[in-house]
């Protein structure tokens, strides 16, 4: 009877250890999923789980497409107004939502301009129309001249 009780206790202990290991693995998996989601949000990427739905697009793909379609902006050789027109047209063709335009545009601008925009309050720095006016002003163009 005593051997059987010891055997049951050992079996119970083994089962308990396995449950603890399973729980630790589940917690680690949840933490990894959480970290991945946080990274997606911080990066401004909106990745859809439904890859078969053609109406849903992935911002990561759009970003890569814009990098291929639009060269990086060179303030010494390029006209900012023309560059913004090209950017807007390509962003519309790539079906990128306007609220994501600033994030896409920042990837194409030189670091000094990105830092200039980053100094603005967050709400304004995420508004494409505000950023556009800011860039036109920085390069000495008014919206009237731009039109």
Image (cartoon, grey):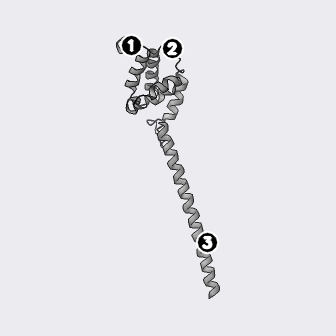
Task: Return the mark for residue 14.
Answer: 3
**Contact, mark 3 vs mark 1 (Cβ under 8 Å):** no
Tag 1, which secondary structure? helix
Q: Is residue 52 visible?
A: no
Rendered position, 7 above or below 46: below
Percent x, y for residue 36?
52, 45
- For the C terminus, give its image quadrant: top left
Q: Earlier in the sequence, mark 3 or mark 2?
A: 3
Q: Residue at x 56, y 60 (%)?
A: 24
Q: Is residue 68 left or right of residue 53?
A: right
Q: Is residue 8 visible?
A: yes
Percent x, y for residue 2?
63, 87
Tag 2, which secondary structure? loop
Percent x, y for residue 25?
57, 58
Q: Earlier in the sequence, mark 2 or mark 1?
A: 2
Task: Return the mark for residue 146.
Answer: 1
How far apart in space, not on screen, are marks 3 and 2 (Cα)? 69 Å
Mark 3 burial class by Cα count in 10 Å: few <14, some 14-19, many 20+ = few
Percent x, y for residue 116?
46, 24
Q: Looking at the image, which is closer to me, 143 or 112? A: 112
Q: Which residue is mark 2?
A: 78
Rendered position, 66 above or below 19: above
- For the N terminus, give its image quadrant: bottom right
């Amino acid at each position: 009877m005593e051997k059987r009780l010891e055997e049951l206790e050992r079996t119970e202990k083994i089962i308990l250890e396995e449950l603890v290991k399973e729980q630790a693995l589940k917690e680690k998996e949840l933490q990894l999923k959480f970290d991945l989601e946080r990274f997606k949000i911080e990066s401004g990427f909106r990745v859809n789980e439904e890859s078969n739905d053609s109406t849903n697009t992935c911002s990561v793909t759009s970003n890569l497409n814009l990098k291929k379609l639009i060269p990086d902006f060179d303030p010494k050789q390029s006209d900012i107004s023309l560059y913004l027109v090209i950017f807007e047209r390509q962003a519309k063709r790539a079906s990128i939502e306007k609220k994501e335009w600033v994030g896409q545009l920042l990837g194409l601008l030189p670091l000094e301009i990105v830092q200039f925009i980053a100094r603005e309050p967050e709400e304004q720095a995420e508004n494409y129309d505000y950023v556009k006016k800011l860039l036109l002003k920085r390069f000495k163009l008014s919206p009237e001249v731009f039109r």
